[in-house]
Each structure stands twice: as structure tokens, then as C-alpha cells.
Image (cartoon, rainbow, N blue to C red):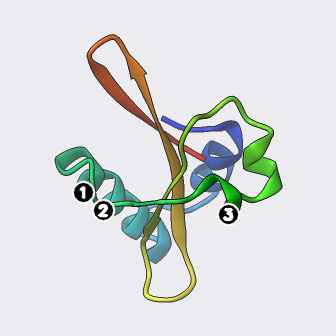
Amino acid sequence: MGHPDFIKAYSSLKKGDYLRLRVDEAMDSLKQNKNRGEKLAKTHWPEKYKQLDIRNLFRYEITKRDYRLIYTIRGVGNTLTYQLL
């Protein structure tokens, strides 16, 4: 599902919390349409993501101004998987 940092942050949100609900909605949306996120040019990647073994990075806005999901798409055979960072 995600990078340990994401899992730690997500797990700290209580069920019913506004942000957790928005994250759940975003994950459902990405499952339905793989192209909802905005691909980030590698030159715009923050340093902490450049250090990971990833080939692409996407941003998905989950609130109008403050929060977004950052994720990568990995291919395993013919299957695409999302890793939330």
C-alpha cells in the first residue's frame, strides 16, 4: 500500500477524521482511474524522493490547498501497483 512513512502517518489518523476520509476517497479514485494524478518532472522531485528506487512520481491533490498524496506507479509483469509515499 505504501512507504513506511505514509503508513505511519495514515495509521495515526482516526477513523472518521476528515483527512483520513479524503485519503480513502483519493485511493478509491486512483483505483478507478490511473490517470488522475499529475506526473512530476524529475527535476521537481524533493530530495527525499530522489533517494528512493523509483522511476516516476505523481501528485494527487486531496484538499484544495493543503494536502496531497505523492505516489509512484510500479509495474510487475502486466500489473500496475501504486505505492503511496
Question: Dot 2 lies on which element?
Answer: helix
Q: Amino acid at mark 2?
A: Glu
Q: Amino acid at mark 1?
A: Ser
Which residue is the extreme one toward the bottom? Answer: 65
| Residue 70 image-quadrant placement | bottom right
Q: Position of residue 56 (x, y in %)?
A: 53, 42
Q: Is residue 79 left or right of residue 54?
A: left
| Residue 61 image-quadrant placement | bottom left
The crowd level at tag 3 (other Cα within 10 Å; few <14, some 14-19, many 20+) is few
Find disc 1 in the rendering and name its residue: 29
Q: Earlier in the sequence, mark 3 or mark 2?
A: 2
- The answer to whether residue 62 is above or below residue 80 is below
- The answer to whether residue 52 is above or below residue 32 is above
Name the residue: 59% across, 50% down. Answer: 11
Which residue is the extreme one toward the left? Answer: 32
Q: Position of residue 71 (x, y in %)?
A: 51, 48
Q: Position of residue 58 (x, y in %)?
A: 49, 55
Task: Say which of marks 3 and 2 sits in front.
Answer: 3
Find disc 3 in the rendering and name its residue: 44
Q: Amino acid at mark 3?
A: His
Label 1–label 3 contact, CB within 8 A: no
Give me the C-alpha separation between circle 3 and circle 2: 26 Å
Label 3–label 2 contact, CB within 8 A: no
Q: Earlier in the sequence, mark 1 or mark 3?
A: 1
Label 2–label 1 contact, CB within 8 A: yes
Question: Dot 1 lies on which element?
Answer: helix
Nearer the observer, 48 or 22: 48
Find disc 2 in the rendering and name its residue: 25
